[in-house]
Amino acid sequence: MLKIAVPNKGSLSETAAEMLHEAGYAGRRDPRALTVSDPRNDVEFFYLRPRDIATYVGSGALDVGITGRDLLLDSGSLAVEIASLDFGESTFRFAGPPRAYTDLTDLHGVRVATSYPGLVGDFLAKNGVTAVLVSLDGAVESAVRLGVADVVADVVSTGSTLKAQGLEIFGPVILESSAVLISANAVLPGIAVLQRRLQGVLVARQYVLIDYDVPIALLDVATKVTPGIESPTVSPLHDPEWVAVRAMVPRADTNHVMDQLYEIGARAILVSSIHAARI
């Protein structure tokens, strides 16, 4: 039975649970449950703190897990990323008092507060910078104002929280993070199925099916707009001068594609959601 680690709380938890449900796996009904067995799919879920998942998976205690790329790299675990799951995006940057620091080279001997000492320490070492890491658990924005650090390294979205603390972002991006699927042994039975199912969920979320009728004379022009994943499906209609076309298109482009098809001469343009997919 494949043992899967799932975040039990935090920003990754809800979306991870939704993806697994859409992929056909059983979820927990009681939010306090620590484990859920799914014998139909030959898996067992373990609900853990996101920061601990990489450690459990890297040790071999669990086979595969969903966590953040930032947490994986910070842990020093033997687990590796085997797939990106395209949610939970975050960006790590340095921030300090305005105009006090402009480049990584300014951080030699400087106190850097962070909740990710492994991640930040590795980044600084790879860039030949020797700084003093101040490890904090949780928000670090107040570290400079309270005098325990000179600079912070933290997750940045709009930068408004840092600005409110009198800090400005500088230097390169430390890491672009998102939710990832991790394992220390990616060839274990069941992991390939899990990957395909989760990939199918991503495809279903990112694409829609578009159906339309178009004159045969305009088919080549229309299918350049809707090339599909491999090739569109083209079917004859009762009128021999028209055909029906079906193709997958990016969900975000749906209305632009419909507009283009209509202008070309396509009609009866319909869009359907995809509930599951295997590509």
Image (cartoon, rainbow, N blue to C red):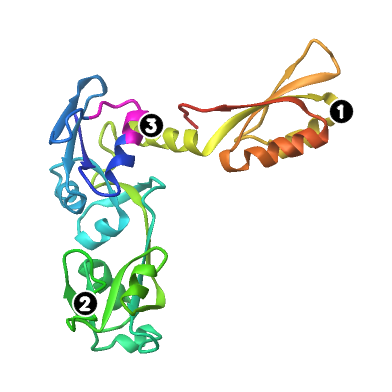
Q: Which residues are magenta?
A: 18-27
Question: In the image, what residue occupies the spot 18% across and 84% down?
Answer: 147
Q: Earlier in the sequence, mark 1 or mark 2?
A: 2
Q: How many marks?
A: 3
- Give above or below for 175 relative to 30: below
For the residues marked 1 and 3, what is the alpha-carbon distance in whole angstroms? 39 Å
Is-magenta flag for residue 11? no
Q: Position of residue 40 (x, y in %)?
A: 24, 19
Q: Amino acid at mark 3?
A: Arg
Instruction: Measure the C-alpha gap from mark 3 to mark 2.
Output: 43 Å
Q: What residue is shown with label 2?
A: 143
**Residue 196, percent from left and from top:** 39, 33
Residue 217's tag is 1
Most extreme residue toward the top is 238
Give the structural element (helix, strand or loop) at label 1.
helix
**Tag on residue 197?**
3
Residue at image point 23% right, 89% down = 109
Mark 2 residue crowding within 10 angstroms, few (<14) / some (14–19) / many (20+): many
Quick check: 120 left or right of 212? left
Label 3 Cα crowd, 10 Å radius (few <14 / some 14-19 / many 20+): many
